[in-house]
Image: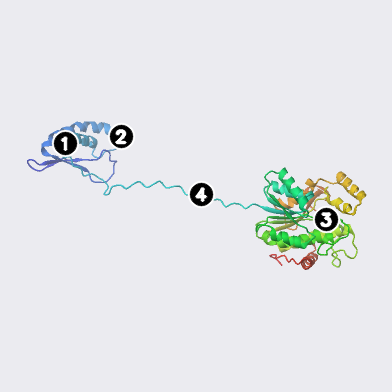
């Protein structure tokens, strides 16, 4: 860039200059200094002194290519030589003053996770034996368990024992008498919430003396089958509203004693306690078979299980009710010698209730001769898969209980 001197007499000298550091290739007007003529001589002296420094040092010190080569020295010399009152700058500056710096943007908050609802289960006959062990182990996994028991006193004792064995367990007690359909309806109406993940139809009676339920049904058929049929039907809307819900109905290997008699469902013509018990357990399997068919595609799984021979209070309950002390002692001795524990007997229930991949209408029991051992697929009598008998029993149960379960498949 050349030097230009303009004006006459007391004119002015125009010196071109640039900012301190302008990267190579930057655009914009240069900085110009207008200096009175009488001050030009010392200004030129300053310029001359700075030229030699800039050329050699500027690039090595700053690493920046300066426009014109000696610009930093020129600017320094001129500004040192020209009186402050006579300096006039026209620099590359913003047209408007910078505004306040915007506050830093806060990172977006992550979405709040949707709370997972607590899983819920209802176990009938949970005051002792298989029902208590099933409820206890479900509570151990964090499931909120409802203990449905006939006796409030025994139910409270079971609840206290459960919470003592598992501190912090979530459990509650509800009264349920399966021999009285009004009690079944009351429980279904009072149960809080609108969802249910698991229903375990466990309660039952075995070989009691002849008797009738509050609604006039033979005791074993009324408690073991009809009571659970009505309870399942009344709770079915909650189960259908819960993804991957399950219904587990506890049967017995003694279903092999006989199938149902359509002409004498209540065994009123000729009552034989063990045959009546076997028929009620066949009814459990026929009910599961038809329920699984009706729930096809709904996401709800209906399965069955049996404990094999497990030591519980069930075996001696009938003889004890009749005062047959010899039979009670014989049952207790057989439990000690032949039976597996209630903890082992509850394993098929827990498998059917919680194991992944449980198939609809499956039947789980002990692996060794349907008697004892780890849970495994169990043999079942051919008549428990009879479609015609299962549909007939469903229709008869609906008529007897007044409960018509609404299912996706009719």
Which quadrant would the N terminus be assigned to in this image? top left
Q: Is residue 394 above or below residue 336?
A: below
Of 247 and 185, nearer the camera is: 185
- Whether residue 211 is visible here, answered yes or no, is yes
Which-is-in-front pick, marks 4 and 2?
4
Disc number for residue 110: 4
Circles 1, 2 touching at the beta carbon (< 8 Å): no
Q: Residues within 10 Å of mark 2 (few under 14, many from 20)?
A: few
**Percent x, y for residue 243?**
65, 57
| Mark 3 vs mark 4, CA separation in Å | 55 Å
Of 328 and 364, nearer the camera is: 328
Residue at the disc numbered 3? 205
Q: Residues within 10 Å of mark 4 (few under 14, many from 20)?
A: few
Residue at the disc numbered 2? 62
Residue at the disc numbered 1? 83
Disc 4 element: loop
Disc number for residue 263: none
**Percent x, y for residue 286?**
79, 61
Which-is-in-front pick, marks 3 and 4?
3
Q: Is residue 302 above or below residue 388?
A: above
Disc 3 element: loop
Question: Which residue is drawn at the image coordinates 42% and 47% (left, top)?
Answer: 105
Q: Indicate which disc, 1 or 4, sits on the residue closer to the N terminus.
A: 1
**Percent x, y for residue 263?**
86, 68
Quarter of the view holding residue 3: top left
Q: Residue furthest front?
A: 153
Circles 1, 3 touching at the beta carbon (< 8 Å): no
Question: Which residue is drawn at the image coordinates 12% and 41% (left, top)?
Answer: 12
| Mark 4 vs mark 2, CA separation in Å | 45 Å
- Whether residue 292 is visible here, answered yes or no, is no
């Amino acid at each position: 860039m050349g030097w230009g001197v303009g004006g006459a007499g007391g004119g002015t000298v125009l010196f071109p200059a640039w900012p301190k550091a302008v990267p190579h290739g930057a655009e914009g007007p240069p900085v110009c200094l207008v200096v009175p003529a009488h001050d030009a001589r010392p200004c030129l002296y300053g310029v001359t002194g700075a030229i030699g420094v800039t050329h050699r040092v500027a690039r090595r010190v700053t690493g920046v290519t300066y426009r014109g080569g000696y610009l930093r020295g020129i600017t320094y010399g001129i500004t040192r030589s020209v009186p402050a009152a006579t300096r006039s700058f026209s620099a590359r500056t913003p047209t408007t003053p910078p505004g306040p710096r915007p506050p830093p943007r806060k990172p977006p908050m992550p979405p709040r996770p949707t709370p997972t609802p607590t899983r819920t289960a209802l176990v009938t006959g949970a005051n002792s034996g298989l029902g208590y062990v099933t409820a206890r182990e479900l509570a151990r996994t964090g499931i909120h368990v409802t203990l449905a028991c006939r006796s409030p006193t025994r139910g409270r004792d079971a609840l206290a024992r459960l919470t003592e064995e598992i501190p912090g367990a979530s459990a509650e007690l509800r009264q349920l008498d399966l021999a009285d359909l009004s009690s079944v309806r009351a429980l279904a109406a009072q149960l809080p919430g609108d969802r249910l993940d698991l229903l375990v139809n466990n309660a039952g009676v075995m070989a009691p003396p002849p008797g009738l339920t509050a609604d006039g049904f033979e005791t074993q058929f009324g408690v073991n089958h009809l009571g659970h049929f009505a309870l399942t039907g009344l709770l079915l809307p909650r189960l259908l509203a819960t993804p991957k819900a399950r219904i587990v109905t506890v049967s017995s290997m003694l279903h092999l004693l006989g199938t149902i008699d359509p002409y004498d469902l209540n065994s009123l013509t000729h009552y034989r306690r063990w045959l009546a018990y076997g028929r009620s357990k066949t009814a459990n399997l026929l009910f599961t078979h038809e329920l699984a068919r009706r729930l096809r595609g709904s996401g709800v799984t209906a399965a069955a299980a049996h404990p094999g021979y497990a030591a519980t209070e069930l075996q001696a309950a009938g003889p004890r009710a009749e005062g047959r002390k010899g039979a009670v002692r014989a049952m207790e001795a057989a439990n000690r010698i032949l039976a597996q524990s209630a903890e082992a007997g509850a394993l098929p229930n827990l498998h059917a209730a919680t194991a992944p991949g449980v198939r609809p209408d499956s039947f789980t029991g002990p692996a060794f001769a349907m008697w004892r051992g780890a849970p495994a697929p169990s043999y079942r009598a051919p008549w428990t898969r009879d479609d015609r008998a299962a549909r007939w029993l469903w229709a008869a149960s609906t008529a007897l209980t007044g409960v018509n379960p609404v299912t996706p498949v009719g």
